[in-house]
Image (tube, rainbow, N blue to C red):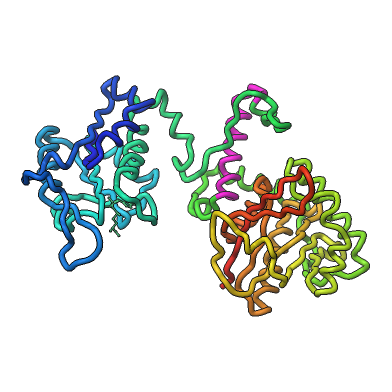
Amino acid sequence: MRIDIMTLFPEAVAASLKISILGRAEKKGILDIRCVQIRDYTDNRQQQVDDYPYGGGWGCVMMAQPLKSCLDAICADAGEQKRRVVYLSPQGKTFDQACARRLAADYDHLVLVCGHYEGVDERFIEECVDEELSLGDFVLTGGEIAAMAVADAVCRLVPGVLSDEECFTGESHWDGLLEYPQYTRPDVWEGRTVPEVLRGGNDAEIRRWRRKKMLERTMDKRPELFERFVPGEADAALIAEIKKDRSRLPLTKSVTCRPVKPEDREAVELLFRQGRNYLRKHRVDQWSENYPLWEDVLGDMERGEGFVMTHGEDVAAYFCLSALPEPVYAGLTDGKWMRDGAYRVIHRCAVGAEYRGTGMADRMFAAAEELTRAMGIDDLRTDTHRHNEPMKALLKRRGFQYRGNVRYDDVGEGRDPRRQAFEKVLR
Ligand SMILES: C[S@@+](CC[C@H](N)C(=O)[O-])C[C@H]1O[C@@H](n2cnc3c(N)ncnc32)[C@H](O)[C@@H]1O
């Protein structure tokens, strides 16, 4: 596979593509990556490559002539090839693994054109470009980072670049799933152990465990990918198994949401204890011995903000849906809230140990969303510890978006005060 990257910054591009795995493949003659200086193909003495835009406006536009002369020289040098000329552009189709596979399989020669400044003269695109590819819906200063990403993703699929096809066929996005979790030595790190099955040496069991994790991860981390995934028979059986694992106690009785009552004390305190144990077991430093307590629930109750989820007569979960603006949310860093107006906050949510994996947490969030909507509010917020993976997965599933970080400086000495903040705009 030959790749020519047309750029105004060939040294910068070469520096990162000619090292490590790709560098070694090039030495073996499997890849031929060339970074070509567009400026060398100007037909003016000043080596000018850009000019002012017709119609006025900010910045400069790259001229068609140097680009076309540069492309012609590359094509003449490479000769007859199955060639694709790609312009990296924020207006292109979003690049993905399927696209990388197509480019690696269908072509021997890729020419990647990097724009800069305000972009390139449209007539060059119309005349010479086969397709436009984007790295995502954001604007980069130049096409170089995008070209490097495309070249890297394509090159590693070229036979012989990686030691074995298995290196990429089991990876994320190959067949629509995310990869299973990876571990290396030591066996125990920060109290977290490597799953037993991976240390057992039974290949069939390991393969099964990994496939199940791939399905599970895609379900939790990228539900939209999972929806598009078409499982074969073996995967369908694993999916059924995952669903069964997750619904240890089927919700056979009616599930309702109602305001918490004083007589719920024992049940709610049990939920908090179970929540604390669960967080401790998962080494999430979120709830202390002093929070949350029944006293907090009494406050919630007074304001009409405390709710329980019931399964039949059973109190299965607790949450507070507060109208009080959360002071720490005003100090959000590394991001921005989507809305400025009134919002509700979910605090102190706890699901009973026997209701984990039954869909009760989803029902609780659905109830909180419904209550918020009924109040005429469309902005729902919450926060959680950055290591609280189950909560983060739940928030993602419910369509909450990560908005930045907040700090609770009153959590007590030696405790982690940082929390990730999430928001959902209710439609
Ligand atoms: C500042 S951008 C020009 C953006 C252009 N004015 C527009 O609004 O569509 C300069 C160059 O960066 C590259 N570029 C910017 N964002 C990109 C993205 N998301 N994916 C691929 N290339 C991108 C393109 O090559 C583009 O010509």
Look at the image and give the residue range highlighted in magenta: 199-221
Camera-side residue of 328 and 19:
328
Residue 115 is inside the magenta segment = no
Residue at 78% over, 69% down: 256
Query: Residue 240 location, x and y as percent?
Result: 64, 48
Image check: 57 left or right of 258?
A: left
Position of the N terminus, as image quadrant, is top left
On screen, residue 208 above or below 71: above
Camera-side residue of 297 and 419:
419
Camera-side residue of 227 and 339:
339
Residue at 52% over, 42% down: 178
**Magenta stretch, overall SS:** helix
Image check: 375 left or right of 268?
A: left
Residue 215 is inside the magenta segment = yes
Image check: 395 left or right of 62?
A: right
Residue at 67% over, 23% down: 200
Residue at 37% over, 45% down: 98
Position of the C terminus, as image quadrant, is bottom right
